[in-house]
Image: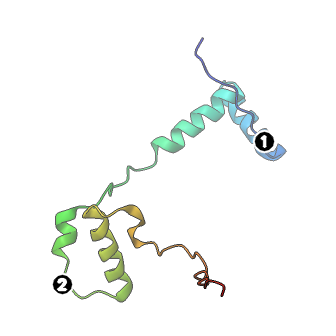
Amino acid sequence: MRNINPFGLRMQPELKAKIEAAAEKNRRSINAEIHARLEESFASQPEPKFRGVDKSALLATIGESYTYSEQAIIEAMLLALRGAPPDAAKPAPNTGPEPRKRFPKK
């Protein structure tokens, strides 16, 4: 037997009735029906075409006309590609006002 942990699932009674009917029609258990439908839903999704940043293509776009927002995005991506630390674009945390200078008592 495979090591599969149980998974509790809450669903509306109407949906459960539909799954039970489909499971009976397909001659499967309710668990097998849910499993098959989930597997099918993931199999039907296309693989994402874009999995990263093509640095040469990004660098080739510099100098073209972009909106301010597009230019800001490109600059942020270039900073990331150049190895800048991830927190480089974040402002310094607000630490409050500077403490008062203490003068010696006379």
Residue shown at 61% from the left, 80% from the top: 99
Asked whether 19 or 81 is in front, the reply is: 81
Mark on residue 10?
Answer: 1
Q: Is residue 17 left or right of residue 29?
A: right
Asked whether 51 or 86 is in front, the reply is: 86
| Residue 78 in which image quadrant | bottom left
Mark 1 crowd level (few <14, some 14–19, many ≥20, 10 Å Cα)? few
> Is residue 52 shown above or below 25?
below
Q: CA distance from mark 1 to mark 2?
A: 54 Å
Mark on residue 63?
Answer: 2
Q: How is the image coloured?
A: rainbow
Residue shown at 38% from the left, 49% from the top: 47
| Residue 49 in which image quadrant | bottom left
Helix, strand or loop at label 2? It is loop
Asked whether 78 or 104 is in front, the reply is: 104
Residue 4 location (% of width, % of height): 62, 22
Which of the image's four quarters has the C terminus? bottom right
Residue 85 location (% of width, % of height): 35, 62
**Identity, as a three-letter code, of the amino acid under mark 1:** Arg
Q: Are marks 1 and 2 in contact (CB under 8 Å)?
A: no
Which of the image's four quarters has the N terminus? top right
Mark 2 crowd level (few <14, some 14–19, many ≥20, 10 Å Cα)? few
Mark on residue 80?
Answer: none
Helix, strand or loop at label 1? It is loop
